[in-house]
Each structure stands twice: as C-alpha cells, then as structure tokens.
Image (cartoon, grey):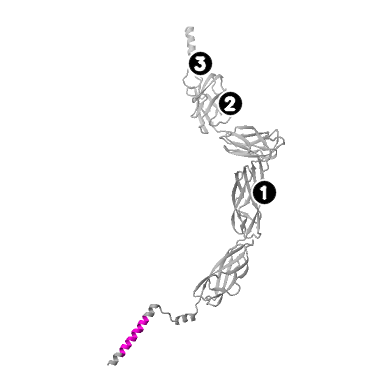
Amino acid sequence: MNRIEACFFVFILVGPMFFIEPVNATGSGVFSLVKCYWGTTEPIEVSPGDVATLTVILKYEARSMLRNLEVNLSLPTGFEAVGGGNKTTVLYTGTVSQGSLVNLEFDIFIAPDVEKGNYTGDLEIYYLSNSPSPQDILKIPIEVSGKPNLVVRVIGDIVHEGKQHVLIEFRNKGDGAARNLKVTKIYSNNGYVELENGEFLGDLEPQHSLNLSLSLFVPTGMKGKILPLTVEATYLGPKNVVHLFSETLRVPVKSFISTPPLTLSLNSRELSIGKNSVVLLNLVNPSNHSVSEIKITLSSGNILKIFGPTILYVENLGPKESKQLETEIYVPSTASAPTASLVATITYFDEGSWQSESESYHLSLLLRGLIDMSLTDFAVIPSKPRSGSPFSITITVTNIGTSTAYAAYATPSLKDLPLKPFGPRSTYIGNIEVNLPTTFTINLQLESTSETRLTLPITLSYMDNLRTAHQVTFNIPITVELEESSNKQQLRQPQPLEGWEFALTAVAVVAAVMVFLWAKKWRKKE
C-alpha cells in the first residue's frame, strides 16, 4: 500500500469524527432552560398592553463547543414581536462550551385584550449552518400576572396654615394586588409630618384604596404657596417582586376658614316607656361647602337601649343639604325618669378647611309612660232600671300599659239620653296603677222613656307622667224595664176611631133603627 492509499484510509477512519452532530435535529436536549422572566437585570411584572423584555437563560449541556446561535421564539396568540409578527429572533455570537449560560432577550408586545394567566412559547435553536430544521426546541413559559400601579393624593388636595389632620389616599390603579404595603417615610421640607395610625397598610387589591391619617403642621407664611410632600413606600407584587415607590405631592396652601359645624337633631324628642321606637335623626350641613366621610357614633346611658345601628355613615353632604338617618331605641318598662339623653359623636372631613373635624351632641329625650286602659267588667244595678228610678253602674278598668295613669275621673255622656245625674256628674277615681284592677261607680236616674235598650258612653280622663291629658271612652249597654201598670192602662184605654170606621158605624146604627121601625109598623097591621 503506497503512502497515498494509506492517507486516504486514515482519512476515512478519522474524518467522520469531525462531522458528528452534537444534537439531534428534532431536539436532543443539549440546551436546558434555567430561568425565564420578564425584565432585563431584575424581574418585573407585566400587564396586558405592556411592551417588555422577556429574558430566557439557557444552559449548554454537551461537550462540544458551538458558535453563533440563531434562536427563534414563536409567540402564542396575543403576543407580538416588537416590529410585528408572532416570531422574534435573537442572534447569539460567541463561543458556547459545556456548562455555559446563554442569556437571550426578546422584546415583546402584549396585546391589551390578553387575559392574565400562563402561556407557552416555542424556542427554536439553530447552530448548524445550512440546516433547515432547528437542532433543539424548548417550551418557554410566559406568564402575565398583572402588576400593581400605586398612586397617592392628599384628600381634598389643599391644606392650610397651622396644625391639621390630613388623609393620604393610596389607590391601586393596576390589575395586580399590592401586598404588604408599608409606608417607609412621609416628609416635607416646609412642614412637620407625623404618622397617626402606623406605617403598615396591609394588602391593597386592584381598583381599591386605603387612607393613611397623618398630623401635618404648616408654618405661617406658606399661604398661597405650594407645600411639597414626599411619600415613600414599599410593597410586593403578585410574583413577589419588590416595588419601591416614591412620589412628591405638590399641595396648595390656603388660609384657614372657620365654618359652622354640622347640626344634628331629632325628628321627635319623645319615646314611649316599654316600647321599641324608630328614632329619626336629621343631619344638616349649613355651610357653603361639602362635608365628606361622615361617621356618627351613637351611645346611651343606663336607661336607653339602642337596638338599631350604633354607627351611621354618610359619604358626602353638599352645601345646605340634609339627610335623615334612623335607628331603633328601646325604653325598658322599669324606667322611672321622665328624661334621657342620647350622645352622638360625629367625625367628618371638612372640605372648606380641608381638615378632619369631630363634634359631640347630647340629645335630650322625653320618656312618656305607656298607658292602655282596658274595660275589665261592669254591672248595672238594678240590672233593668225602671223609669223615674235611680240606678248605678259599677265599672272595673285595668291599666295594661307600663306607666301609672294620674288623676283619673269618669264622666257619663248624657246627651240625647233619658238619663240625668243622681249626685255629682263626674266620679273622681285617682291614680290607676299598672295591672291593678280599679273599680268606680256612677249614679244616674232614668227618666220616663219607651225605649228598652240604651247605650251610655262613659269617658275616662287621666294624665300621664308628663302631665299630658288623655281620654278613653267605654260604651255601656243598659236594658230598661217597662212598668206593668202602665201596660195595663194602655190596654184599657179605648182607641180613637178612624174616619172610615166612624162612618161605617153611623150607617149601621141608622140601618138598625129603620129595621126596628119597620118591624113595629108591620105588627100593628096584623
């Protein structure tokens, strides 16, 4: 074998080693996915409508070295490459050896109508020239989690000189929750700021808001100027991405305006003892500006029991406007005092002075005793009085209410009745206690009458614990007995004849006389 043949033989044996493909054309797994996230240097969260960079980090597992990768990412529906199309390409230049990390960045537009959720893209890797098919294919997870978008403002947008309470509103205008919201710092170079209710605000869901109360002192000389107020906060997004927030608010300073406070009154200042009553409260804003975030807290002493809501809310009350609120209050039957009080504490935000205010009101109430008279029994003595004779009516009433009836007396109503008083017209009874039957007697005389049944109204008059007069009327039936002698006399008395009866009688008499005379004449002829 000559030298040329020997070299050719060696080339046949060794040559194929330089042309063995390190991966299969359909994907041999020489590349593995290490990490995939939105963002470049640090992970971020994305929402529909965003343009963001998707970073894909791959690890090369094979022993052979590669150069100049071409990587195509096929995007799911709703995702586009910046510049158009559903596929984005990255050319990676450099040497790739075993264990190397390949960092790829794809600029992607997320359509506004894409819903939040998990999607998948296809990553095609080309590293052999003149090969129409990719040498490796990987599935790339793509997540649209949504992200919080925090904005802050001073409620009212204006402050005044001096010390005041200010509410800072934190609103999440994004589509992802802001978790563990913490206010790290609020300060102003032209004023003094002190937090009132702590720095931790908790979680803030999308399209929701939280208020932070702080005490602010604006020095004199700031009227008509702008007060810078810097708010710094931290929070976590849906993917535990840390968000650092800092914004400087420019708040106008106005002069302090003293305005009349809200007025609160009762629609009725009277309650009934032993009853549950609906109480109406009239809230009026007499000022020329709006009042918002109104909270009314009701409390009572030992007498009244509030069965309705004790905390009432009004979102906004415009200038000169009023609103009627209601609750339920029970007065125990054991209450003996004629008055009680209801305490109302009102907190609100005055949009005229741009500060939070607090007012207390003591509302006095009259406690009226509940009196309910019931007719228990009655007796007419004798049971059937006669005309011209006196008789008496004994009546028993019971107060089934919750309060004593004072200075009670009874008066019969004798109008258009054949009755007259037999003694005093009215009968004094005195106090009628609760659940204690009380009996009184009325003496009358029956005049001449042909009626057999009468109905006598008897009016009971009394006063309650507030010295207010009341009346209640009971109708007492009376059966009248007619005298026997009168009946007989009426039977013996002749009844007058009517005109036709008289004429008929006269004709009969004349006829009888004529018959008598004719008979007498006939006898003489015989």
Between the residue at mark 2 and the residue at mark 3, the CA separation in whole angstroms equals 38 Å
**137 left or right, relative to 406:** left
| Picture coordinates of residue 89, whole percent (x, y) | 51, 22
Which of these two is toward me, 201 or 271?
271
Q: Name the residue under label 1.
A: 360
Asked which secondary structure carries label 3, the reply is helix
**515 in the magenta segment:** yes
Q: Mark 3 points at which residue?
A: 18
Which is in the foreground here, disc 2 or disc 3?
2
Residue kind at label 3, given as amino acid type: Phe
**349 left or right, relative to 449:** right
Q: Residue 40 carries which label?
A: 2
Magenta: predominant secondary structure element?
helix
Asked which secondary structure carries label 2, the reply is loop
Q: Which of marks 2 and 1 is nearer the N terminus?
A: 2
Q: Give the range drawn in magenta.
A: 504-520
| Picture coordinates of residue 238, whole percent (x, y) | 57, 34
Which of these two is toward me, 489 or 27?
489
- Category of crowding for the residue at label 3, using alpha-carbon neighbours closer than 10 angstroms: few (below 14), some (14–19), many (at least 20): few
| Picture coordinates of residue 383, whole percent (x, y) | 53, 75
Q: From the image, which quarter does the C terminus lie in? A: bottom left
Q: Earlier in the sequence, mark 2 or mark 3?
A: 3
**434 in the magenta segment:** no
- Taking the view exactly as shown, the residue that stands out farthest to the top is 2
